[in-house]
Image: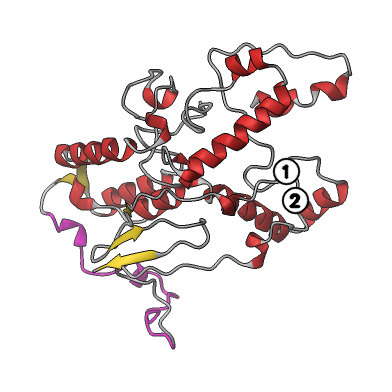
Amino acid sequence: MLIPMAARIRLISARARCTTFIREPTWVAVSGFSGFQPRRFEPDEKDRFTKDPKALHTFRRWLEHNANKTYPLFFARSEAQEEARNEFVNSMRDALKNPGLEEKVIPPWAVGCRRLPNHYMFLGPNSPIAQANYICKHITRIQQQGIKSIEVTKEAVDDFIEHKDQYMKDMVWNEDCRSWYKGNTADGKIIALWPGSTLHYIDTLRQVRYEDFKVQDFGNHFSYLGNGMSKLEMAPDADLAYYIRQRDDAPIIGSKFVYKKAGPELTAINMTTAKASEETTTDVSRLKFTNRVRHICIPQAYLCIYTIESSPSLDNHPIRVQQ
């Protein structure tokens, strides 16, 4: 990314200039919008991160935690989007101080409608990063079960595209702005984004829906069962009673939703490591949901429909569960 590097130009010389050529207007994010005010890290902080991996891990999680809280602003015409837009516009006007430039630089479309693409790619249509584990689950099954080929069904693809297109109608990326999300068009279909948040994507790929794939075996479907013995039994020193234990520590199976509450190291704005203050950061907890009632897809929650209603903030929203 060249934008962070451009900030260093003034450090080289007070008379240094940077000429920028842009195809179309673009949003410049409010400094500290995701909860952290960009700054130089002190030598003692760098030393702490080097010597204490836990401190660095906590800081990374804190950044990601706050970034994930901003997802509701991507719902078009929502209060969160309107609030973000107002903050971005005011920030850009304060920086430009030139009505002529404001008209040329400030976009007419929603915040987040277009963004800089990442060309270091391991991607497919409507798929963000982090597919490796999902792909490896398929590879492992192919290897272990002697599968000749595996192919997604046309019905699954068509249904996903139909759902994705319907979902994107209410998102800011669907507005009239040219974007790589839409194949460098202004009014094309959104082909580069997942229909949901980061956490929604993680939940969805946690389990493979094998019913969406057509599998072809080399012969008998169960030939991979072999001689009826586990590979574990071939190791002379293996624990052959590992499944006998004093407490139930197996992963939860079913649609029960269990979450880990964010600790004070993630919810505190004035984090010691971050050195972020209320005056220099945007409090993402103020972003509001739209007044529309929206149905949120929670994978594996087959028995319930979760509905988020109108709410004053992201951190305190009622969820009505319809059985």
Task: Report the residue at 76% width, 26% height from top.
Answer: 7
The quarter holding residue 33 reads top right
- Where does the N terminus fall, quadrant-wise? top right
Residue bearing the label numbered 1:
37
Q: How many labels does the image show?
A: 2
- Where does the C terminus fall, quadrant-wise? bottom left
The quarter holding residue 162 reads top left
Residue 243, image x and y in percent?
37, 80
Please name the colour scheme applied to the rendered image.
secondary structure
Residue bearing the label numbered 2:
276
Task: Report the residue at 36% width, 72% height from top.
Answer: 252
- Residue 131 as seen in the image, left or right of residue 156: right
The kind of residue on which mark 1 rests is: Gln
Q: Earlier in the sequence, mark 2 or mark 1?
A: 1
18 in relation to 72, above or below: above
118 in relation to 166, above or below: above
Q: Does the magenta stretch include residue 230?
A: yes
Task: Report the residue at 66% width, 46% height from top.
Answer: 282
Between 38 and 103, the residue placed more toward the observer is 103
Q: How far apart are marks 2 and 1 (CA)?
A: 6 Å
Between 242 and 215, the residue placed more toward the observer is 215
Circle 2 residues within 10 Å: few <14, some 14–19, many ≥20: many
- Residue 115 as seen in the image, left or right of residue 16: left
78 in relation to 296, above or below: above
Residue 65, image x and y in percent?
57, 54
In this picture, which residue range is highlighted in magenta? Answer: 221-246
Q: Overall secondary structure of the magenta stretch?
A: loop
Residue 218, image x and y in percent?
15, 46
Contact (CB < 8 A) between labels 2 and 1?
A: yes
Task: Report the residue at 40% width, 82% height from top.
Answer: 248
SS for tag 1? loop
